[in-house]
Image (cartoon, rainbow, N blue to C red):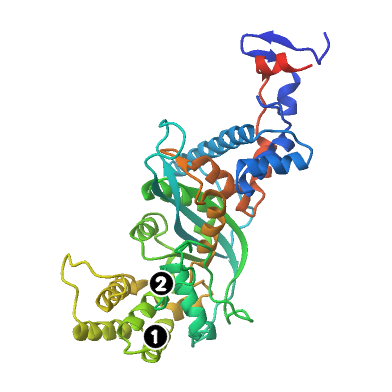
Amino acid sequence: MSPYATVPTAAGTFSPLRISLRLDNHNFSPSLLERIVEASARLCSFADASFALHLAGVEISSRQVQRIAVEIGSELARQRDRKVLLRRRRQLPPRVPVTPAVVAVEVDGGRLHSREPGCGPGVHHQQGKEDKVACLVTLKSRVYKQDPQPQPPASFLEPRRVRRLVQQIKGHAGDKPQDASGQEDASASVQEPSRTQPRPGASQRLVRTCVASMADSRSFGPMVAAEAQERDFYRASRRAYLGDGAKYNWWIQKVYFSDFEAIVDLLHVLCYIYLAAWGVGADEAQGWSIYTDWMRWCWQGRVKEVIEELKSWQGKIGKPSKGEELDEKDPRRLVAEALSYLKNNQSRMDYPRYRRQGLPITSSLAESLVGEINARVKAPQKFWNRPEGAEAILQLRAFVLSEDDRLARYFAQRPGNPYRPRNSAQASP
């Protein structure tokens, strides 16, 4: 009997070589399947992926691209969940040959549009849903006896740059947002204000990997912990966990990263104190003067002094009454929000000590990663079906944005299927 022969079965046509060739039910080779999946994850839509593949000589419809992407993304989600279970059983070994010296885990969230499925054509019962994103990064840095930069960088003291940063993160900054149509995306890529030279003592990013999911924080925390376990983060000599003031960030840190240095993102602190200073200042000049003082004090770890000044200003302008609805630019609201934020996060704002340890003080890497994730899953015309939403494509996007070739490794190990579906066998010449 020829080794290339096929045998009809109830499941379809069987070929002995399909497993060794690692062909699945789509009849694409692993290398071509990887190209299809990567195109669907990197480009803005399945239609764009189909067109790009057409230019490369691969004829495949956008619907088939979508089916393959959802199938592989679902496989990756199941693989992720198995690793979570292994970690819970303490059976998940590190997969890196060398324990990293300096690591950081940064967690943030984005927003995407969802719709109710099964309601006919169009968008029905649309809702905004949060996708959670974690950036796990190895770093290169050194330890200092003294604070390598005791004064804030010039970029934090330049009005135009600071105003733009606050507009990106908080959506308003004293003046009207530059996009008068209201289309500016507050979750867009946010980084520290640009500078010509690296900040003295700043850590250097080495390898980034990503975790992304529509899951709630209680499910997302174990996913991040499993990724950290595989990368041997828990045995690193210097470890940092960064996030904004969201409660779920610090629940995840307390439960899964309790021995990591907890650091609240300095850029969010900047936004709160800038808006409060703008609110209490009699004019723009006075507001800027107040902000620069508070910025220096926070940079130098003198958070208690800022809190005392905010309390003093609150005594002058008044405290919001319980349940009172205030305009988002009301000075009483801005001061109360800044005061609450600083009091809740004071223990995570010892920035001089973090700089001496060579640790990051902003979660700008996670903020930027959210922007990269959103580039694929968020657009005015994109609505993902509930409840699964964008879970499958989030897995693919996280894989291609991770800098350890994990997508290629996955396809190198993915088994084939010995059965060719009967309909595709009949369609073959």
What residue is drawn where x is 53% and y is 46%?
394
Provide the secondary structure element on which disc 1 rests.
helix
Judge from the rendering whether residue 428 lies leftward or rightward of residue 314; answer left or right: right
Provide the secondary structure element on which disc 2 rests.
loop
What residue is drawn where x is 71% and y is 29%?
22
Q: Which mark is residue 278?
A: none
Q: In the rendering, at what x and y percent does residue 362 appear?
A: 48, 71
Q: In the rendering, at what x and y percent does residue 210 appear?
A: 55, 53
Quadrant for the C terminus, please. Answer: top right
Judge from the rendering whether residue 34 lies leftward or rightward of residue 135; answer left or right: right
Amino acid beneath label 2: His
Per the image, the residue denoted by label 2 is 172
Q: Earlier in the sequence, mark 2 or mark 1?
A: 2
How far is disc 2 from disc 1 in space, using C-alphas? Answer: 16 Å
Which is more toward the observer, 316 or 184? 184
Q: Is residue 356 visible?
A: no
Per the image, the residue denoted by label 1 is 291
Q: In the rendering, at what x and y percent does residue 217 appear?
A: 38, 50
Residue furthest to the front: 181
Residue furthest to the right: 2
